């Protein structure tokens, strides 16, 4: 009975793996098709689409643009998110539950509503649509993820270490910089990678807050609306390989770092 | 790495020169810094104020601010306001929503879609999470979970495009069906609620899988063994023990997936057709045309957010009472 169950469940698991991987594998394959026409079967193969996008200035520029946005927004998210985490985890204070609720709000608002709200707010603040607006919206949206990860790590920090530092004469700031911050490094790095990927992959906020220069997902979306072509597959594949590789690396890195320092 | 090095370095320096020569020692002895620190740490109250001021300000202006401004714009009769015209508050945008089925039908459809897709995601991922948590050794659990995480690092647009290639008229699915001799002509999967559902489940599955997995993983195996010793069959063990004790995971996973599903914009645009227009597309429409439609768009966004929150609130309460009812 139990054995039979196990086999059925294993089949379901592998079927799910297929569901999750097959579309991506098909998409990658299609990028090597030697024809402008998207569809199966693929009869001849080529690398032309890849050489094409790597010599296309617009694609390369868009790529760099997305990376810069991801880096800058991550920097802001990490600094602000860590600060909020330290506040929320340090002591109980009046209104802490409310503060926590406000902190997670951007992560719970459905994508389209979040984008619209940022668009309206940006106009009120007189931020022009464009790079600054995108960076700002990504930064705000990603803060909760940083705060949650850092809070989880902070809650395992032995309080005695801080007390010892204070007893030895360190003021709160130095105790924070020399004890707490080094302890948080793995969490902060993990959260940074997560923010980078969230920002790099984000479509809806970049779409509504962007000016004339598209980010990579917005560019792919615009190309898709005017028709599918293997060129899009090549661009998507490059983005896919990059994000998946960074994701896997971060996963392993944070696991090792957490193991090492606990 | 570098931090560790510097710590051990100035620990040595500390012993030798009593903190005079190290960076931290110099900082602590620097007059300006000392004055600054005395000012900051004068009283616990002031210290807390300095710690809290920036985060509170950020949360109010950046997290709450956009939502409040959206609410305000939704209550205006025109936005942006012309320089010499007074702002007038009106509920016109809200009445507009109820006045025409062209507006409330998409919302209704979005909610039905989101609910159905959430249920599908739950039914698909529960066995997967169950398998991972109960039938796989600890060492392999992480590996098998990591395999599933890889595709979820990939962005929304890229994965939507992958679904388009799978389901197109000359796509892989139609080719496979034709090859098997099941169909003569391709089935038009694309631009239907089916393609949209497949895409959305594909995008949200992880947000269901992880809460379910962590709930199932926490559940002690001994509970099931005890029930089995007492003669409970596999089905009643699942229904009486596993399911009630994982309701929390089901509840939080479903809430997350439901909220995310209602907010998708690009996926319905790319995978859906004219008969599957979702509310996100309706809202977005007001922001692509002339600016004076903004209050309507804002009002619609507010309506959608409130309705989505109400539904998830009722759902969570229901799950809670279900859990209490089962355990008593």
Image: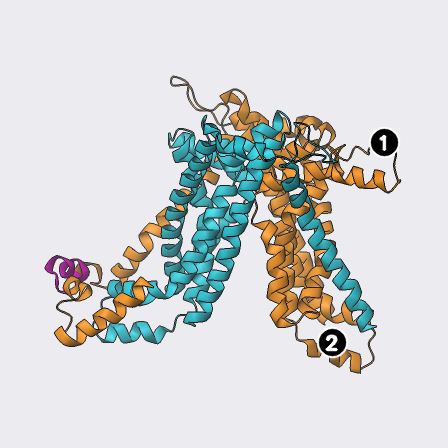
Chain colours: A cyan, B orange
What is the x, y in percent for residue B184?
88, 33
Mark 1 — on which chain does it sit? B
Residue B36 belongs to the span the image colors magenta? yes
Left or right of A115, for residue B205: right
Q: Residue at x 37, y 59 (%)?
A: A87
| The one of B79 and B173 positioned closer to us in this rendering | B173
Q: Quadrant of the N terminus of chain B?
A: bottom left
Left or right of B269, for residue A115: left
Q: Main secondary structure of the magenta part?
A: helix
How packed mark 1 is, by other alpha carbons closer than 10 Å (few <14, some 14-19, many 20 or more), is few
> Which residue, as the protein is rendered here, is positioned at the far bottom?
B229
- The residue tagged 1 is B185
Left or right of B274, for residue B206: left
| The one of B103 and A119 positioned closer to us in this rendering | A119
- Report helix, strand or loop for mark 2: helix
Marks 2 and 1 sit apart, C-alpha to C-alpha, by 50 Å
First in sequence: mark 2 or mark 1? 1
What is the x, y in percent for residue A18?
71, 52
How packed mark 2 is, by other alpha carbons closer than 10 Å (few <14, some 14-19, many 20 or more), is some
Residue A105 belongs to the span the image colors magenta? no
> Which residue, as the protein is rendered here, is positioned at the far left?
B31
Q: Quadrant of the C terminus of chain B?
A: bottom right
Callouts 2 and 1 in the same chain = yes
Q: Residue at x 24, y 64 (%)?
A: A174
Q: Is residue B231 above or below residue A221?
A: below
| The one of B67 and B15 positioned closer to us in this rendering | B15
Mark 2 — on which chain does it sit? B
The label shown at residue B224 is: 2
Is residue B174 visible to us here?
yes
């Amino acid at each position: 009975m139990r054995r039979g169950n196990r086999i059925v469940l294993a089949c379901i698991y592998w079927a799910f793996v297929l569901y999750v991987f097959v579309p991506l594998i098909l998409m990658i394959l299609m990028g090597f098709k030697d024809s402008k026409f998207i569809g199966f079967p693929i009869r001849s193969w080529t690398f032309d689409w890849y050489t094409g996008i790597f010599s296309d200035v617009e694609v390369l520029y868009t790529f760099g643009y997305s990376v810069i946005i991801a880096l800058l927004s991550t920097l802001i998210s990490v600094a602000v998110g860590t600060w909020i985490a330290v506040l929320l985890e340090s002591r109980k204070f009046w209104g802490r539950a409310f503060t926590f609720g406000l902190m997670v709000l951007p992560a719970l608002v459905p994508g389209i509503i979040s984008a619209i709200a940022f668009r309206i707010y940006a106009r009120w603040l007189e931020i022009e649509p464009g790079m600054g607006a995108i960076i700002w919206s990504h930064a705000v949206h990603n803060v909760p993820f940083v705060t949650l990860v850092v809070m989880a790590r902070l809650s395992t920090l032995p309080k005695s270490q801080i007390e010892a530092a204070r007893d030895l004469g360190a003021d709160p700031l130095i105790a924070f910089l020399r004890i707490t911050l080094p302890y948080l490094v793995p969490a902060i790095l993990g959260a940074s990678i997560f923010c980078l990927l969230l920002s790099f992959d984000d479509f809806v906020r970049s779409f509504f807050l962007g000016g004339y220069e598209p980010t990579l997902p917005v560019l792919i979306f615009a190309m898709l609306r005017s028709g599918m072509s293997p060129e899009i597959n090549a661009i998507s594949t490059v983005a896919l390989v990059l994000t998946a590789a960074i994701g896997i690396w971060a996963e392993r890195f944070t696991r090792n770092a957490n193991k090492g320092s606990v | 790495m570098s931090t560790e090095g510097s710590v051990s370095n100035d620990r040595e320096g500390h012993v030798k020169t009593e903190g005079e020569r190290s960076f931290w020692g110099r900082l602590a002895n620097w007059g300006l810094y000392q004055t600054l620190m005395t000012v900051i740490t004068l009283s616990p109250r002031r210290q807390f104020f300095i710690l809290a001021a920036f985060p509170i300000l950020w949360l109010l202006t950046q997290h709450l601010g956009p939502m409040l401004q959206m609410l305000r714009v939704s209550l205006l009769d025109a936005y942006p306001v012309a320089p010499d015209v007074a702002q007038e508050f009106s509920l016109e945008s809200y009445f507009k929503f109820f006045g025409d089925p062209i507006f409330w039908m998409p919302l209704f459809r979005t909610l039905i879609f989101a609910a159905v897709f959430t249920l599908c995601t739950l039914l698909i991922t529960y066995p997967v999470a169950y398998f991972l948590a109960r039938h796989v050794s600890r060492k392999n659990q992480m590996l098998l979970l990591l395999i599933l995480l890889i595709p979820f690092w990939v962005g929304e647009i890229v994965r939507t495009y992958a679904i388009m290639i799978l389901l197109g008229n000359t796509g892989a699915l139609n080719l496979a069906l034709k090859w098997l001799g099941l169909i003569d002509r391709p089935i038009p999967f694309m631009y239907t609620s089916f393609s949209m559902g497949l895409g959305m489940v594909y995008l949200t599955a992880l947000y269901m899988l992880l809460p379910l997995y962590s709930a199932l993983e926490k559940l002690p195996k001994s509970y099931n063994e005890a029930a089995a010793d007492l003669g409970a069959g596999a089905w009643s063990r699942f229904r009486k023990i596993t399911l009630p004790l994982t309701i929390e995971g089901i509840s939080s996973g479903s809430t997350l997936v439901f909220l995310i599903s209602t907010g998708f914009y690009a996926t319905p645009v790319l995978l859906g057709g004219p008969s599957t227009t979702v509310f996100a597309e309706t809202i977005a429409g007001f922001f692509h045309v002339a600016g004076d439609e903004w209050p309507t768009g804002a009002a619609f966004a507010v309506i959608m957010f409130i309705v989505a929150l109400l539904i998830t609130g009722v759902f969570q309460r229901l799950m809670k009472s279900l859990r209490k009812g089962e355990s008593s």
